[in-house]
Amino acid sequence: MENIDIAKIFEEVADLLEIQGANPFRVRAYRNAARTVETLSVPVVSLLKKEASALEELPGIGKDLAGKIQEIVETGELRMLKELTAEIPEGLVEMMRIPNLGPKRAKQIYDELKIESLDGLEEAIRDGRLRELRGFGETLEAKILQGIEEQKARGGRVRLAEADAYVRPFVEYLREGGCRLIAVAGSYRRRRETVGDVDILVATKKAKAFADRFVHYPQVKQILAHGETKCSVVLRSGLQADLRIVPEESYGAALHYFTGSKPHNIAIRTLGVKRKLKINEYGVFRGSRRVGGRTEEEVFAAVGLPWIPPELREDRGEIEAARAGRLPTLVELKDIRADLQMHTTYTDGKNTLAEMAEACRARGYEYVAITDHTQAVRVAGGLTREGFKKQFREIARLQEKLDDIVILRSAEVDILHDGRLDLDEATLAELDLVVVSVHSKFNMAKEQMTKRVVRALRHPRVHLFAHPTGRIIGRREPYPLDLEEVIRVVKEHNVLLEVNAQPDRLDLNDLAVKMAKDAGVKIVINTDAHRIEELDNTRYGVDQARRGWCEAKDVANTYPLKEFRKLIAK
Ligand code: DGT
Ligand code: CA
Ligand code: CA
Ligand code: ZN
């Protein structure tokens, strides 16, 4: 149980209390507690271990809230939240989650128009009832409609990192039930940025007992199907999980089939047909004779191919590459030697420079870049020239004590609306690594935005373009940008492109990574961490780089520092 999880529970309690029209002081108490817990530099769990009363010394945490924190840590949930959730219509909670609505407005809509679903809300906007409420107008209506659409478009898809958080303990639990082989297949295994549902595959001799164990997982909210070899459930998080139990001799064929993607499967099956083979989830067959299917390798070998990594199985040329012996040796997490975007308490980070550097050292990195914001990013408290000077001095002092990691002087320099950089030349000249990115005016026309970005990328001191499309999965579309043009320009000016590993950014995405690679542009996988724990998100960036066919040599932060410096030299 991490601080952020506890904070989330308190935020949700506050939202639900607000919907119920609870005393505003009570609502605020939960919001404050959420903030206190979230910004705490040590895990709450460790405080509790020392002594339970340590919590009460935190700002805004009294006896009552301390008790609730203890309950969350001990049981993994809060009874009060469960009760609140049961009291409030589900649709109302959905409405509350729409950006620009929030609990207050959702409640107002519920009270005055008796609406308690997204469909009802959409209807009320279309027939003009919503704008009659106090405080609602056309602009807000448009934003709400967009929010509803985005929510629907997401179609219940879950970000990969979130799915990970639910899947790992589930698989752990299933393993304890005893099985020879278990895997999570589907889009999860292919490491798609979002997953629709998770597909769990198991080979076991005790199928019936295993299926029972599956549907009795304590996090199961609803059982959709409960057969002896096939089950399907919805977890409390809303994530659907399907289970398939197969005999060991079919395991490889089933793993291949349920890993997908569907177009990849069809292509493989078609290759089989040409060789007079039938390939399905039960095995590889010639007539009625089984000729393979115990392992995935056997399935591929049956059609004359080497094993293909799941991340490539999208029918985007992997079969041709495999046949030609040209499959890439995909980059791995252990290849990464540096993290080149992170924030500290100098701006909007939660940990100090020293803490971040030490955490990177502990992760075995060889070098690291500290990339605090520049002034234009006001919400983050961007640094002035003086601020950077102070930071450089601290880096120099810190470096004297650390001989196994190099701290690069860097900055995430904001690209101003006209493409100029938000930092003076003298400071830019002192940076080891100049990272640039867009943080404002996302609604420019494509041509104008491309011009703006290209101007910045042509600046002779720029090394790396961070979160190049600005998208936030499920919340913000990429800004209009001619990515092909950007790739041409960075190729010409020797600028690297980032794969930002924040689970809701993953920016560049897999397809764009492939475009960059094909153009001979190198990428950098960065966490953009705002706290120590987020430094562990690198693997989600690696996933997308692999889906973009990247080898270690395509990823600049897999190079030793000396080589990296040569790579970025202008
Ligand atoms: P998702 O869940 O939407 O993120 O995507 P997947 O790829 O996990 O799709 P899902 O869960 O519907 O099915 C899992 C795999 O099963 C899919 O990747 C390929 C295989 N599969 C499902 N339906 C078919 C089908 O009609 N034909 C073939 N060849 N394979 C299928
Ligand atoms: Ca799936
Ligand atoms: Ca499925
Ligand atoms: Zn940023």
Image (cartoon, grey):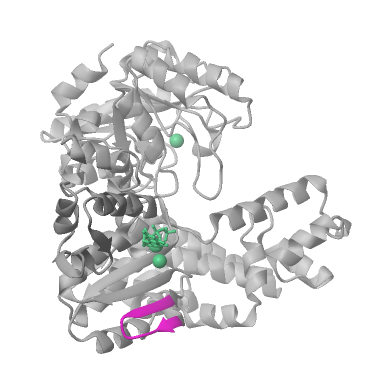
- At a point 33% along the width and 74% down the height, the residue shown is 243
The quarter of the rendered structure image containing the N terminus is: bottom left
Task: Tell me if 493 is positioned left or right of 247 in this view.
Answer: right
365 to 170, vertically: above or below: above
Task: Tell me if 480 is positioned left or right of 229 in this view.
Answer: right
Task: Tell me if 334 is positioned left or right of 122 in this view.
Answer: left
The quadrant in which residue 39 appears is bottom left
The quadrant in which residue 94 appears is bottom right
- At a point 20% along the width and 69% down the height, the residue shown is 251
Q: Quadrant of ligand 1?
A: bottom left
Please name whichever residue, 289 or 253, is drawn nearer the observer in this view of the structure.
289
498 to 459, vertically: above or below: below
Where residue 266 appears, x then y in whole percent?
A: 35, 53
Q: Which residues are magenta?
A: 224-233
Residue 417 visible to an observer of this rendering: no
Where residue 270 appears, x then y in whole percent?
A: 31, 51
Residue 320 visible to an observer of this rendering: yes
Where residue 57 appears, x then y in whole percent?
A: 41, 67
- At a point 54% along the width and 33% down the height, the residue shown is 378
The quarter of the rendered structure image containing the C terminus is: top left
- At a point 71% along the width and 52% down the height, the residue shown is 145
Numbered marks: total? 0
The question of residue 230 being in magenta is answered with yes
Please name whichever residue, 502 or 389, is drawn nearer the observer in this view of the structure.
502
Q: Main secondary structure of the magenta part?
A: strand
Please name whichever residue, 508 or 301, is drawn nearer the observer in this view of the structure.
301
Where residue 403 appears, x then y in whole percent?
A: 10, 33
